[in-house]
Amino acid sequence: MKPYVSVELQRRVRQRFADCCAYCHTAEDLTATTFEFEHIVPIALGGETTLVNLCLACPMCNRYKSDQVLVPDAVTQTDVPLFHPHQDRWADHFAWNESSTEIIGLTAIGRATITALRMNRSQMIRVRQMWVAMHQHPPTFAD
């Protein structure tokens, strides 16, 4: 059973993340899906339904994240925390490549999050190429 997220809390989460996925920064209005209110620390691990524990996530990032909070970094061979959209700044851990189609991990957290959430899967790279050509990507909001 999904926890209830009040309309006001949904509005505040959407505003905080400018209707973009907190992880891959995909803009919801460029997709044919409704984004989800994701518990950063899963309820199963004691996370609560509060503003500081909720983010907006595209369905793919949300599914791949699942209930993970620690994931392996391939470079350091250690488990690191996933990117936390309220505690971490996106630009500290991620950047766009020159063509703005792939997300580059700048830190162990960034690299591990990209891998765990499959943020650069081939389908996303292809659709980002289209969005770039349309001058709709990358998003301009700052977190």
Image: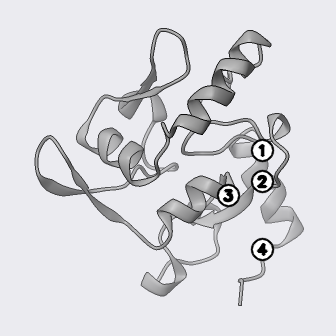
Q: CA distance from mark 1 to mark 4?
A: 15 Å
Mark linked to residue 59: 3
Give the Cα separation between the discs numbered 3 and 2.
19 Å
Q: What amino acid is found at the position of numbered circle 3 in the picture?
A: Pro
Say whether residue 33 is left or right of residue 86: right
Q: CA distance from mark 3 to mark 1?
A: 18 Å
| Disc 2 target residue | 12
Viewport quadrant of the C terminus? top right
Upstream in the sequence, badge 3 or badge 4? 4
Q: Earlier in the sequence, mark 3 or mark 1?
A: 1
CB of mark 1 within 8 Å of CB of mark 4?
no
* Picture disc at residue 5: 4
Q: Relative to 66, is 96 above or below?
A: above
Q: Which residue in the structure is indicated by mark 1?
A: 15
User: Horizontal and vertical percent for residue 31?
Assistant: 80, 41
Which numbered disc flags the more N-terminal residue, 4 or 2?
Answer: 4
Up the image or down, 5 lies above or below 142; here it is below
Front-lying residue, 112 or 85: 112
Give the distance between the C-alpha atoms of the residues marked 3 and 4, in whole angstroms: 17 Å
Amino acid type at image mark 4: Val
Q: Residues within 10 Å of mark 4 (few under 14, many from 20)?
A: some
Q: Is residue 36 visible?
A: yes
Q: Residue at x 63, y 64 (%)?
A: 38
Q: Is residue 104 left or right of residue 30?
A: left
Q: Decide which of 125, 91 is in the foreground and name it.
A: 125
